[in-house]
Image: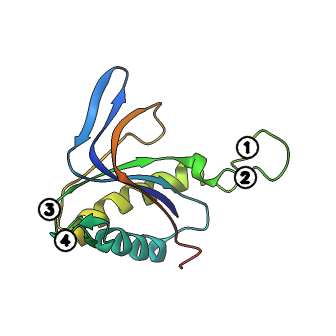
């Protein structure tokens, strides 16, 4: 599982000109799922995201998690996070999980993130053409891959 995480002042997902999900201060997660992902990836990544200390404390140091600031989270499926640009100029998405595998994992991830964090987690619509609006705060953007646990 790959996640591109952005600390935001606010973010929203628009589908067919309708706002389907919005958050205020918190984290926007773009989530890419590959065929080899499973429960272990969900557990590790939801724990890491929930405890990621990217919010400022009173001294202006990024020392607080989304839980500490009682923020919100928005998860958006994004298979393009598994793009391979090794050959040619047209990305290959062969490592991205097919919907039959990805949808249940995506739904489990969103549910588990809410359980682990104790926060409400909103989401886009898997497979839909979405417009994502956000105000990146910082800017803070972090890439996490459950197959490369640095």
Q: Residues within 10 Å of mark 2 (few under 14, many from 20)?
A: some
From the viewer's perspective, tell me whether residue 114 is left or right of residue 29: left
Q: Secondary structure at mark 1?
A: loop
Q: CA distance from mark 4 to mark 1?
A: 43 Å
- Name the residue at 37% across, 61% down: 108
- Name the residue at 35% across, 68% down: 49
Assign the C terminus to one quadrant of the image: bottom right
Tag 3 residue = 70
Q: CA distance from mark 3 to mark 2?
A: 36 Å
Q: Residues within 10 Å of mark 3 (few under 14, many from 20)?
A: some
Tag 2 residue = 84
Residue 136: give x, y in percent of width and height.
Answer: 35, 46
Tag 1 residue = 91
Q: CA distance from mark 2 to mark 1?
A: 5 Å
Which tag is nearer the camera, tag 1 or tag 3? 3
The residue at the far top in this view is: 17
Residue 85: give x, y in percent of width and height.
Answer: 76, 49
Residue 131: give x, y in percent of width and height.
Answer: 42, 30
From the viewer's perspective, tell me whether residue 79 is left or right of residue 47: right
Tell me where residue 148 sits by quadrant: bottom right
- Name the residue at 24% across, 39% down: 22
Q: Secondary structure at mark 2?
A: loop
Tell me where residue 104 sits by quadrant: bottom left
Work out whether 118 lies above or below 130.
below
Q: Secondary structure at mark 3?
A: loop
Which tag is nearer the camera, tag 2 or tag 4? 4
Residue 13: give x, y in percent of width and height.
Answer: 34, 35
Q: Secondary structure at mark 4?
A: loop
């Amino acid at each position: 599982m790959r996640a591109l995480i952005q600390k935001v002042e606010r973010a929203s997902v628009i589908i067919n000109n309708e706002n389907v999900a919005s958050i205020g201060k918190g984290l926007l997660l773009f989530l890419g799922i590959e065929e080899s992902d499973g429960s272990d990836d969900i557990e590790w990544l939801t724990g890491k995201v929930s405890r990621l200390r990217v919010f400022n404390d009173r001294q202006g140091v990024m020392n607080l998690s989304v839980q500490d600031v009682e923020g919100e989270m928005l998860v958006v499926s994004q298979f393009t996070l598994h793009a391979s640009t090794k050959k040619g100029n047209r990305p290959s998405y062969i490592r991205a999980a097919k919907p039959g595998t990805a949808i249940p994992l995506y739904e489990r991830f969103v549910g588990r993130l809410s359980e682990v964090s104790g926060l409400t987690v909103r989401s886009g619509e898997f497979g839909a053409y979405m417009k994502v609006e956000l105000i990146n705060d910082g800017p803070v953007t972090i890439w996490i891959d459950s197959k490369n646990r640095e």
